Image (spheres, rainbow, N blue to C red):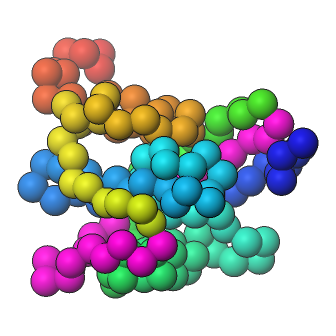
Amino acid sequence: MTKYAGQKIRVVTAEVRRDGRYLITQRLAKSILPHLWEFPGGKVPDGESSEDVLIRLLRDKLGVTAEIGELVMEVVHEYDHYAVDMQVYRCELPEDEEVQLLKVQDARWVSPAEFGDYEFPGADEATISALLDLDDPALTEQDYN
């Protein structure tokens, strides 16, 4: 059985964009779903706010001071033995702060066209699909009517 068998886990992640690219991070070898890529973030402990946890996680994992913006989407994804309720917040990082690899294997800035080059957990894949639909410049106003 897995560590979170039967649970619904609340997770918070950051959508960080810079120059048309998104920040993604690679999980450590000792993590659940090791070496997969994801939007930076993590588990939200009971009783804590998503925004406070996200600020702390980005500082602890990447050494950056984030400004947390709006909640852009929420994705629920069922894995074999547990479910993830992922909240995605738009975040800004100061231009003068470099991302550090403190508690992640790697970090990359990738364009939407490059997402297919990386392996993501299911919840992040659902988020990517939603982001690409929201940001698709080929969509016109008549696509929404």
Q: Residue 116: x and y, percent?
A: 31, 28
In-front residue for pair 117/133:
117
Which residue is most to the front? 29
Q: In what quadrant of the picture does the N terminus appear? A: top right
User: Which span of residues is magenta-colored?
Assistant: 81-103
**Relative height, residue 96 to residue 122 (above, below):** below
Residue name at image x 36 percent, y 72 percent? 101
Report whether residue 67 is seen.
no
- Residue 87 falls within the magenta-colored stretch: yes
**Relative height, residue 119 to residue 88 (above, below):** above
Residue name at image x 57 percent, y 49 percent? 34
Residue 124 as seen in the image, left or right of residue 90: right
Residue 89 as seen in the image, left or right of residue 18: right
Q: In what quadrant of the picture does the C terminus appear? A: top left
**Relative height, residue 61 to residue 109 (above, below):** below
Q: Residue 143: x and y, percent?
A: 25, 15
Which residue is most to the left? 19
Report whether residue 7 is seen.
yes
Q: Residue 22: x and y, percent?
A: 25, 51
- Residue 102 falls within the magenta-colored stretch: yes
Residue 100 as seen in the image, left or right of residue 127: left
Residue 143 as seen in the image, left or right of residue 47: left
* Numbered disc total: 0
In-front residue for pair 54/62:
62
Q: Residue 37: x and y, percent?
A: 43, 47
Quarter assignment of residue 17: bottom left
Residue name at image x 27 percent, y 74 percent? 99
Quarter assignment of residue 118: top left
